[in-house]
Image (tube, rainbow, N blue to C red):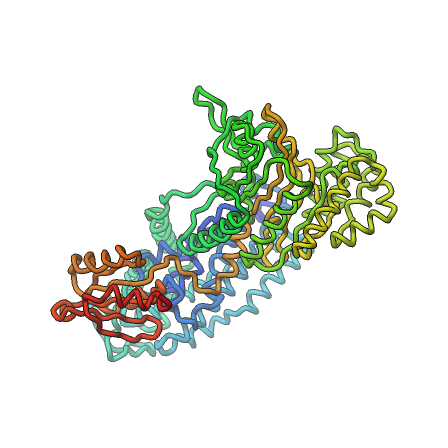
Amino acid sequence: MSSLLESCQLIDQSSAALSTVAVAVAALSCEAARANLSAFDLTDSGDGSVAKDDIGVSSDIKILLNGSKLAVSSNKGDDKFNTNSFSMIPVVYGNVREAVKSLHSVIRVVSNSGEKFGGKVLHLCFELRNLGESSLERVRLNLGSISVEGLKDIFEKECLSEESLRNGVKLAVDAELEKDHVKLAKDVVLVLGIVWKIVAWEAVTAFFVLEGIEGLNEKNGGKGGEVDGGHVKSEKKKKKKVLLGRGTSFIVEMIKDRLMSKGDGLEKIVLEFLSLLDPKSPDFDGLLKKVKDILESNESRRIPKTPKGTRDFAKEQMAIRKKAFSIITKVFERHCATALDTPAFELKETLTGKYGEDSKLIYDLADQGGELCSLRYDLTVPFSRYVAMNGLTSFKRYHIDKVWRRDNPSKGRYREFYQCDFDIAGQYEKMGPDFEVVRILSEVLNALNIGDYEIKLNHRKLLDGVLDICGVPPAKFRTICSSIDKLDKQSFEQVKKEMVEEKGLSVETADKIGTFVKIRGPPLELLSKIMGGTEGTELLKHDASKEALGDLSLLFDALDKSRCIGKVVFDLSLARGIDYYTGVIFEAAFKGGVQVGSIGAGGRYDNLIGNFGTKQVPAVGMSLGIERVLTIMEDKAQNQAVRATETQVLVGVLGDKLWVAAELVSELWDVDIKAEYKVHKKVMKHIEYAIDSKIPWMIIVGERELNEGIVKLKNIETTNEEVIPRSKLVEELQKRLNPSN
């Protein structure tokens, strides 16, 4: 067993070093290939959808390349190099880091269990193979860009290939199947050795792309010419120096210092280079320490982070959000609602007991010696408190604001997020407000143009009738509803197990519930079928469910006449876990490719307002899951140009006269033209900025224009330029911006 432990410790240490050095080498390849760095713009979205190790790798790459003039940070990179060779680095290398940490955690606490080592070691072996294959792709890319003769021949003698990696992994898999964990560890050591060689060759090839052999000659006092005993011919033209990243430049200089005094001839230089990246080499620890120092001392490591479950929104995201909120507000105001704002936190007693099992997700604020308060969980309870507090008997309002939930962040689930609510409180014609809020939800989703969706609809009294008929005690109605509400994420067998084992129902009762909650279909057809079938006979004998079926008949007729019933599905499994619902309940789900869960929901809550100690005021409302809707919109916008600003005109002043820019742009601002300015001596800097920012018009003013009392007006899309009198600038611009006026 000591042999196994020693092998695993060697794998642990060597893999940990590899996970650091390989990232530095990949950064060199990014510069060698002038790669697009957009794949490394990973941030913690707050919902757990991006692995932390992937983010860590991306951060390390950007630290190493900070200040580089070779790797590009936008979509301007050479398409030849915008491949998986670079875009997959965060995922592939992040997975290795995760696997190394997993193995390390076991080695620390286990010293005599091959079983526990085996799975972790084999998992790491697979991830090492992926890293090796990724690095090998970049070796070949680099070799294709090198003018150093003979280097490719030396590489081919090594016989490094995907096949050698896969054969090594196959041996490891066979050893694990045979439960020979000592052999497994030794096989993984061999795979690890192959990966180290590949990464070393990636470093060699990237270095020669960046520096050529001339870099070594310059370091040796500027002596040019051939390297004795080798096949390297220096180019006649001196290679133009390009600024590398602050981190990668340190590494390149360290390599130069090491190679300068170590023999002549290409083959000897390469062998010396490869030995520098050999973990058994006496100089390896110095290289590893240097890379770690660069990464750990960098100021970027001390940049503050957002809390889990929260996120920042960049300018492109804000443009999409602003558009969405504008569309939603327009729909809400079309239905004649007024806006309402309430405090971000409420008295704790206001929120307590309103959310059933989800009450545990309420954020309580620390007691500062005054009132006990909590952050609002939704916008419905504060609305009800407002209506009760002000003695209102009718109120149609909308509210768009943030809410907070102490939830575990996951994809599409945050701790801080926006809700967009529309509620109608008061006495109205039966089912009239219910029809309107369902119609509003449909209008909003149509206006946002997200794609296909459905609105599942049920009635809380119908569900209560089903539970009563099935033999569920009334005291357990709400907790069983919480279980049924999970049917959109779990199978009925899983929900049944919870109802029986955790909530005390009999198997027979749970099975009977199953016969009802599996009923689903088009509203009018299904309602007619229920009313005339066996289920209807039982339900019509029950007062609550009979009343619910009557409500649904009115609602479905109204939705049919309003031409929005095609998106509605009558679904008896819909339960909505929140306690305060008393009538119609509904939930919208996106049916497109992005998996986001519920995108909107609502229902009737006739008793909530009265719970605040005033007279009962019936109410119904809907809430749009705007964060999930925005995820869909952002996904659709990925291949579309999104303007972060609405700038109509760029005032470009050639030179350094700020007062000229101030005078011109102020004239435009005064007549409500959306304009910005730049002062720079190079006209192309202005034009490039206008193109990148998608600004349609540009005013160009230099010394000649100032002297002659003119300006140049440029259409960025057509590239046409016109000369117009300075005195008519505003008039001419307005004609072009508003041609119909």
- Residue 290 is left or right of residue 503, and the answer is left
Name, please, the residue furthest toward the top. Answer: 369
Query: In the rendered view, would you say 556 is above or below 265?
Result: above
Question: In which quadrant is the N terminus drawn?
Answer: top right
| Residue 464 seen in render | yes
Task: Judge by depth and name the residue closer to the eye, 607 or 148.
Answer: 607
Task: Judge by depth and name the residue closer to the eye, 488 or 84.
Answer: 488
Q: Residue at x 71, y 33 (%)?
A: 478
Task: Tally the marks.
Answer: 0
Query: Picture quarter containing residue 64?
Result: bottom left
- Residue 693 is left or right of residue 381, and the answer is left
- Residue 563 is left or right of residue 32, and the answer is right
Q: Residue at x 16, y 61 (%)?
A: 656
Residue 308 lies, in percent from the top left, at 48, 41
Q: Residue at x 59, y 23 (%)?
A: 613
- Residue 37 is left or right of residue 658, and the answer is right
Residue 679 lies, in percent from the top left, at 21, 61
Query: In the rendered view, would you say 551 is above or below 716?
Result: above
Residue 719 lies, in percent from the top left, at 31, 74
Question: In which quadrant is the C terminus drawn?
Answer: bottom left
Residue 309 lies, in percent from the top left, at 50, 42
| Residue 10 seen in render | no
Task: Judge by depth and name the residue closer to the eye, 421 or 314.
Answer: 421
